[in-house]
């Protein structure tokens, strides 16, 4: 399941994953003027954490991904720090591109999608049936970060369960330095 989440991320971004021997510095993931917060339900345990670089036509971009598991369900997150050229040329179509790439997967079926805003940032949610798995994938444009939160379950009803609902309902994006 952990490997599937990693593969899905790669397909979602339509980036070729090239294993880079070097790791990006931790502070590269602190450049956004926004604070992104979410809470993983206590029943989920961290099973993977990785950083590296993806190769895209505009150069290598740093990413950080994590996965948590509870029985057959998985939560995955990814932050990719996109270059300015990507923001100028591709960010406007990022959600449509992500949808198109997901639906290229054999047997993929779009169940629902919607655009919304969290804080001052655009977001997009896709619910997709993919072979024997159901996925809710939400994308957040937080310049310079492209963030993704995924919930994967072998049952469609898993996407309506309390764990999935609380994960996505608990996401917030606030300007750094703002007090709640």
Image: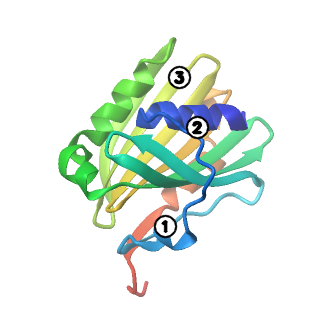
**x and y percentages locating residue 143 in the rendered image:** 31, 62
In front of the other: label 3 or label 2?
A: 3
**x and y percentages locating residue 80 in the rendered image:** 45, 53
Q: Say how many tags the image has.
A: 3
Circle 2 residue: 159
Q: Are marks 3 and 1 in contact (CB under 8 Å)?
A: no
Q: How dense is the environment of label 3, judged by Cα within 10 Å: few (below 14), some, or many (20 and up)? A: many
Q: Quadrant of the C terminus?
A: bottom left
- Relative placement, left or right, of 31 versus 149 is left
- Give the alpha-carbon distance from disc 3 to disc 2, as whole Å: 11 Å
User: Which callout, 3 or 2, points at the residue further toward the start of the chain?
Assistant: 3
Q: Quadrant of residue 70?
A: top right
Q: Nearer the viewer, residue 173 or 50?
A: 50
- Judged from the image, the secondary structure of the residue bearing numbered disc 2 is helix
- Give the alpha-carbon distance from disc 1 to disc 2, as whole Å: 29 Å
Q: Are marks 1 and 2 in contact (CB under 8 Å)?
A: no
- Relative placement, left or right, of 60 versus 158 is left
Circle 1 residue: 29
- Judged from the image, the secondary structure of the residue bearing numbered disc 3 is strand
**x and y percentages locating residue 47 in the rendered image:** 77, 50
> What residue is shown at x 44% (from left), y 42% (from top)?
55
Q: Is residue 13 above or below residue 47?
A: above
In front of the other: label 3 or label 1?
A: 1
> What residue is shown at x 38% (from left), y 41% (from top)?
56
> What residue is shown at x 43% (from left), y 49% (from top)?
60
Q: How dense is the environment of label 1, judged by Cα within 10 Å: few (below 14), some, or many (20 and up)? A: some
> What residue is shown at x 32% (from left), y 56% (from top)?
83
- Judged from the image, the secondary structure of the residue bearing numbered disc 1 is helix
Circle 3 residue: 129
């Amino acid at each position: 399941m952990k490997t599937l989440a990693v593969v899905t991320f790669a397909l979602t971004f339509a980036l070729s994953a090239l294993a880079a021997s070097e790791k990006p510095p931790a502070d590269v993931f602190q450049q956004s003027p926004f604070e992104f917060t979410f809470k993983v339900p206590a029943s989920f345990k961290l099973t993977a954490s990785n950083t590296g670089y993806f190769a895209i036509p505009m150069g290598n971009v740093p990413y950080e991904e994590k996965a948590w598991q509870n029985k057959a369900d998985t939560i995955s997150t990814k932050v990719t720090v996109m270059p300015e050229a990507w923001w100028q040329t591709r960010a406007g179509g990022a959600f449509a591109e992500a949808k198109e790439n997901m639906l290229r997967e054999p047997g993929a079926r779009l169940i629902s999608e919607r655009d919304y805003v969290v804080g001052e940032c655009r977001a997009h949610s896709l619910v997709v049936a993919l072979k024997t798995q159901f996925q809710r994938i939400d994308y957040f444009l937080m310049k310079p970060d492209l963030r993704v939160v995924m919930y994967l379950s072998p049952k469609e009803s898993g996407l309506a369960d309390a764990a999935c609902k609380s994960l996505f309902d608990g996401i917030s994006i606030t300007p750094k330095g703002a007090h709640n």
